[in-house]
Each structure stands twice: as C-alpha cells, then as structure tokens.
Image (cartoon, grey):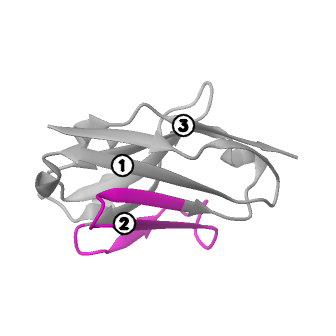
C-alpha cells in the first residue's frame, strides 16, 4: 500500500508559477509510474504529466514547455513545477502512483483508472 500526500496548491494570477509536492509513504519500492492529474468542475480527470522510476517523462500537450515533473528518490517526493499558468489550468490537482508495468509509463498518462494510489488533491486557481 502506498499513501500520497499533496501540498503546494493555491491561487495565482495568470503568468505566475506554483510548485506542487507529493510525498509518498509505504511500499514505495513497488511504484513504477507516478503522475499528476487534474480535474476541473464538470470535467473528467485529465493526465498532466507522468514520470517512471528511470526518470522518463511524458506531458500532456496543453502543459508542454510550461510544466515540469520531477522526483526526489531520496525523499520519495514527486514535484510539479508549473510556470506561465493560465486560467484554464484551474483545477484540483492529484498525484497518483501505479505498480503496473504492462505498458511504458507514458501510456498511463491517459489511463487514470490504472492507478491504485491517489492523494487527496490540492486546489490550483489561476485568475486572469
């Protein structure tokens, strides 16, 4: 079992930056792929970025060049650096982890149902 705890959300004006953190606890050795997802009111859960245990990353087209996912293996912490934020980035952001290795990590950007560990979410609000 893996527990995930996010922090770092908040309110910012368009063009600003935020960094989200996700601390992982428990059987972290079992994790293959970790990711950030977001969900805006009335919309489905959308993959933002994923990273695998080798450090390979995949991003949604909507955040490429603006967001960076990274991982500190020593502290089992996942990060999402968000720059040049836009109002359409407003959402609840969740980190997630999966032990599944059937596909490469990039596949799981589009498959939130394959993640078995989720954080509680942190709100990001971007005003224009």
Mark 1 or mark 2: name the one nearer the start of the chain: 1
- The N terminus, quarter of image: top left
Residue 113 percent across, percent down from the top left: 28, 37
Instruction: Name the element at disc 1.
Output: strand
Residue 8 percent across, percent down from the top left: 57, 47
* Occupied quadrant, residue 78: bottom left
Q: Residue furthest top?
A: 42
Disc on res. 83:
none
Q: Nearer the viewer, residue 1 or 93?
A: 1
Q: Which residue is mark 1?
A: 23
Mark 1 or mark 3: name the one nearer the start of the chain: 1
Label 1: how many Cα within 10 Å (few below 14, some 14–19, many 20+): some
Front label number (1 vs 2)? 1
Residue 121 in view in this figure: yes
Instruction: Name the element at disc 2.
Output: strand
Q: Please check the rendered image and state whether residue 79 is part of the magenta-colored stretch, yes or no.
A: yes
Side of 106 where 120 appears, left or right: right
Q: Which residue is mark 2?
A: 71
Residue 111 in view in this figure: no
Side of 13 where 103 appears, left or right: left
Disc on res. 122:
3
Residue at image coords 23%, 75%: 54
Between the residue at mark 1 and the residue at mark 2, the CA separation in whole angstroms equals 10 Å
Instruction: Name the element at disc 3.
Output: strand
Side of 76 where 19 appears, left or right: right
Between the residue at mark 3 and the residue at mark 2, the CA separation in whole angstroms equals 18 Å
* Occupied quadrant, residue 83: bottom right
Q: Please check the rendered image and state whether residue 55 is part of the magenta-colored stretch, yes or no.
A: yes
Residue at image coords 58%, 69%: 64
Residue at image coords 36%, 57%: 77
């Amino acid at each position: 079992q893996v527990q995930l705890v996010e922090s770092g959300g908040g309110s910012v004006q368009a063009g600003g930056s935020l960094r989200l953190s996700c601390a992982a606890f428990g059987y972290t050795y079992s994790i293959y792929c970790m990711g950030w997802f977001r969900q805006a009111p009335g919309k489905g859960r959308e993959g933002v970025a994923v990273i695998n245990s080798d450090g390979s990353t995949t991003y949604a087209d909507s955040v490429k060049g603006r967001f960076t996912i990274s991982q500190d293996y020593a502290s089992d912490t996942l990060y999402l650096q968000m720059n040049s934020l836009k109002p359409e980035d407003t959402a609840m952001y969740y980190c997630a982890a999966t032990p599944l290795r059937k596909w490469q990590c990039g596949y799981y950007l589009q498959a939130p149902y394959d993640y078995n560990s989720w954080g509680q979410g942190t709100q990001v609000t971007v005003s224009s």
